[in-house]
Amino acid sequence: MAGHGFRRISLLALILVAGTALSGCDTLGGMFGGGDKSDDTTPQYVERPVEQIYADAWQKIRERSWSDAAKQFGEVERQHPYSVWARRAMLMSAFCFYQANKYTDAISTADQYIQLHPGSKEVAYAFYLKAISLYEQIVDIGRDQSKTEAALVALQDVVQRFPDTDYARDATLKIDLTLDHLAGKEMAIGRYYLRTGDYIGAINRFRTVVEQYQKTSQIAEALERLTEAYYALGVYREAKTAAAVLGANYPGSTWYQNSYDLLTQHNMKPEIEKGSWIGRAFGFL
């Protein structure tokens, strides 16, 4: 789900993190496509100079053998833990795990980097890499959304800690998509309750969308569904207010037309009623 924006940020970060190691590489071209070509086997331990391990890791990157590259960078940490290369290698390893779609490993390695090097200039990238690894694991709204919620927290953390960075700007866009996804989950459950006649259950779900996800694309439908559910319960004050707020914000939408038709067919009209929680939620009362 990360897309090309992340790839551009990753390339920039990779150059910054790798530092002088790049001098031994012929090219970075074409390195971010085609998936992971690693054989996923554990190499036999052979003690090598740190420069050689780094060169071998970069060769694996050029081959797009991301898992193998991550293992090579891990060897830097194991064989030369106190060298200046070890810190860089840890972050490079996390990045390669991400590229290999091994998000759990990417997250744990990024977390390790954050714990060991909280003051480094590359720590912003570690936070971002953790967040984007969680974001990539977001599943469809019919399944458990714990990873979505974790991704939201991690993305918000990036924005709060590093507000004036490319990482924060990209995280902000992904926060909007993540919120919309969570709102979609509430809507799916609410629609089910509405179909089965559990109007209270439906209202509770649509109310969550109104109160917690008001800026998402789900809000127009949530207001229309609230009109339906409240009308079915005979709570006409809220039904009329939901339709009125919908008309004020989305006057040309099909959702408003549906709400308007429902009310006018029963000699009512959309209007904001005093004391309605929906009116208060949108600042009308």
Image: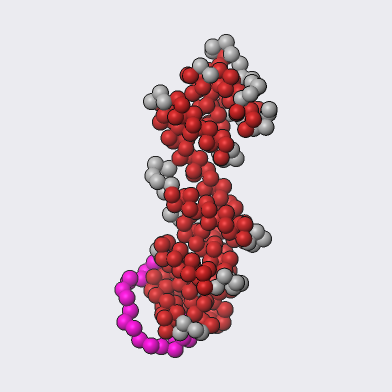
Is 271 on the left-hand or right-hand side of 209? right
The question of residue 42 being in magenta is answered with yes
The part of the image, by quadrant, that contains residue 35 is bottom left
The question of residue 105 being in magenta is answered with no
What residue is shown at x 49% (from left), y 23% (from top)? 229
Q: For the image shown, how many numbered marks are present on the structure?
A: 0
Which one is nearer the viewer's eye here, 110 or 221?
110
Magenta segment's dominant SS is loop
User: Is residue 55 visible from the viewing direction of this image?
Assistant: no
Q: Position of residue 10 (x, y in %)?
A: 54, 66
Which one is nearer the viewer's eye here, 216 or 108?
108
| Residue 145 higher or lower than 87, as above or below | above
What residue is shown at x 67% (from left), y 32% (from top)? 283
What residue is shown at x 39% (from left), y 41% (from top)? 142
Which one is nearer the viewer's eye here, 46 or 77?
77
Q: Position of residue 79 (x, y in %)?
A: 42, 84
What residue is shown at x 55% (from left), y 73% (from top)? 117
Q: Position of residue 72 (x, y in %)?
A: 41, 78
Coloration of the structure image:
secondary structure
| Residue 124 higher or lower than 218, as above or below | below
- The magenta stretch spans which residues? 34-57
User: Is residue 61 visible from the viewing direction of this image?
Assistant: yes
The part of the image, by quadrant, that contains residue 56 is bottom left
Spot the residue most to the top: 267
Q: Position of residue 282 (x, y in %)?
A: 64, 32
| Residue 228 higher or lower than 182, as above or below | above
Locate the C terminus and report the quarter of the image it occupies. top right
